[in-house]
């Protein structure tokens, strides 16, 4: 693999899903209450799997370890359908809120569990909240030690000086202390007038006008890395216990949850449009195309 990673030759882009449950994460984030992932995450992943199957598209599913342990049949279904499976942590804990040792234990635990359930080797990692920054720059050494081949977390390009730059390519090689490297292939952004704008990522894809997404997709260099979450297509009524907590929540919390619910009805159709008009594959397939 050359040091300068060219992107002009790519035909397809990367489709990825961060498999997490909004109810379980929301209860912890907003109300400091730990509950296991709910069935919602299964139902919505199955909807995405059906869509990908219909469009004959392979994707990368970054799984939380706790989701895999609670719903092993879902992991096996993703693997059986021919998709890549990656690790998204164990309990969706920000990297910059935990120690190197804790992160290594949690990521290693999730990786082993998912590999045992799926029967597939794990190559990719995406940090919860894409929390790769100055406080968590040690993560790449951890990933190298655990046998990962790539990371897909550097969504805001925090380390412009830390990494080597490769002719404006979104794909970078990060050198490790053992002289090996981790490939960084982050969710896509687009630079205009000195500002870095997100493209096709989670809430941005759901909330922003779709004409914005389509316009930047035409301008962005390939491969474009799209990411979404199962809960962003979830239009089911939240569980009663969650609704009761929300009734007593602060105005700020209610507003944040309202934003997270905005445009959920439209996202499925937007994904359908992207799959019909662009060619997507899993991230590991893009990595292998480089080699």
Image: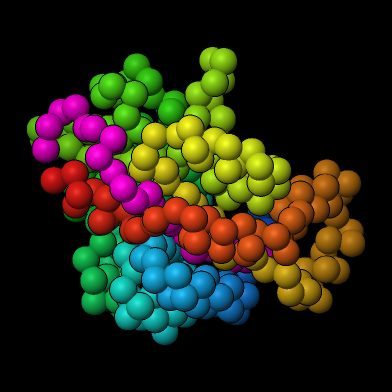
Tell how many labels: 0
79 w.r.t. 164: above or below: below
Viewer-closest of 238 and 57: 57
Q: Position of residue 6 (x, y in %)?
A: 23, 32
Does 191 sit left or right of 136 as displayed?
right
Q: Is residue 97 visible?
A: no
Q: Which residue is nearer to you in this view: 192 or 257?
A: 192
Question: What is the quadrant of residue 2 in the picture?
Answer: top left
Q: Residue at x 58, y 50 (%)?
A: 202
Would you say residue 7 sits in the magenta stretch? Answer: yes
Relative to 66, residue 26 above or below: above
Q: Residue furthest bottom?
A: 73
Is residue 254 toward the left or the right of residue 92 in the image?
right
Residue range (magenta): 1-25
What percent of the width, then of the height, locates residue 16? 43, 56
- In the depicted view, which residue is nearer to us: 18 or 191? 191
- Residue 113 lies, in percent from the top left, at 32, 71
Q: Residue at x 54, y 21 (%)?
A: 192
Is 278 on the left-hand or right-hand side of 246? left
Please say whether residue 14 is visible from this viewpoint. yes
Whether residue 239 appears in magenta in the rendering, the answer is no
The type of colouring in the image is rainbow
Residue plotted at (31% across, 48% down): 11
Farthest-out residue, front: 277
Residue 188, given in percent of the width and then of the height, sits at 45, 39
In the displayed structure, would residue 47 be above or below residue 180?
Answer: below
Observer-nearest residue: 27 or 114? 114
Is residue 21 depicted above or below 96 in this figure? Answer: below
Residue 256 relative to residue 187: left or right: right
């Amino acid at each position: 693999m050359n040091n300068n990673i060219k992107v002009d030759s790519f035909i397809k882009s990367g489709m990825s899903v961060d498999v997490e449950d909004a109810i379980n994460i929301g209860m912890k984030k907003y109300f400091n209450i730990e509950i296991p992932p709910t069935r919602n995450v299964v139902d919505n992943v199955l909807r995405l799997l059906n869509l990908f199957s219909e469009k004959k598209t392979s994707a990368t599913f970054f799984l939380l370890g706790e989701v895999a342990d609670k719903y092993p049949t879902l992991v096996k279904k993703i693997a059986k359908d021919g998709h890549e499976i990656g690790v998204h942590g164990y309990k969706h804990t920000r990297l910059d809120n935990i120690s190197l040792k804790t992160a290594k234990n949690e990521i290693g635990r999730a990786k082993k569990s998912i590999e045992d359930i799926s029967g597939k080797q794990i190559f990719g990692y995406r940090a919860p909240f894409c929390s790769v920054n100055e406080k968590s720059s040690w993560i790449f050494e951890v990933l190298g030690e655990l046998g990962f081949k790539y990371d897909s977390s550097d969504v805001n390009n925090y380390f412009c000086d830390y990494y080597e730059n490769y002719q404006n390519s979104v794909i970078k090689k990060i050198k490790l202390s053992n002289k090996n490297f981790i490939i960084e292939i982050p969710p896509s952004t687009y630079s205009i007038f000195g500002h870095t704008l997100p493209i096709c990522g989670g809430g941005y894809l759901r909330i922003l006008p779709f004409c914005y997404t389509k316009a930047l997709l035409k301008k962005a260099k390939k491969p474009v890395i799209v990411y979404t979450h199962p809960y962003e297509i979830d239009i089911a009524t939240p569980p009663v216990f969650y609704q009761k907590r929300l009734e007593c929540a602060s105005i700020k919390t209610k507003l944040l949850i309202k934003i997270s619910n905005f445009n959920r009805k439209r996202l499925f159709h937007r994904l359908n449009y992207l799959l019909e008009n662009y060619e997507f594959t899993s991230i590991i397939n893009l990595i292998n195309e480089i080699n």
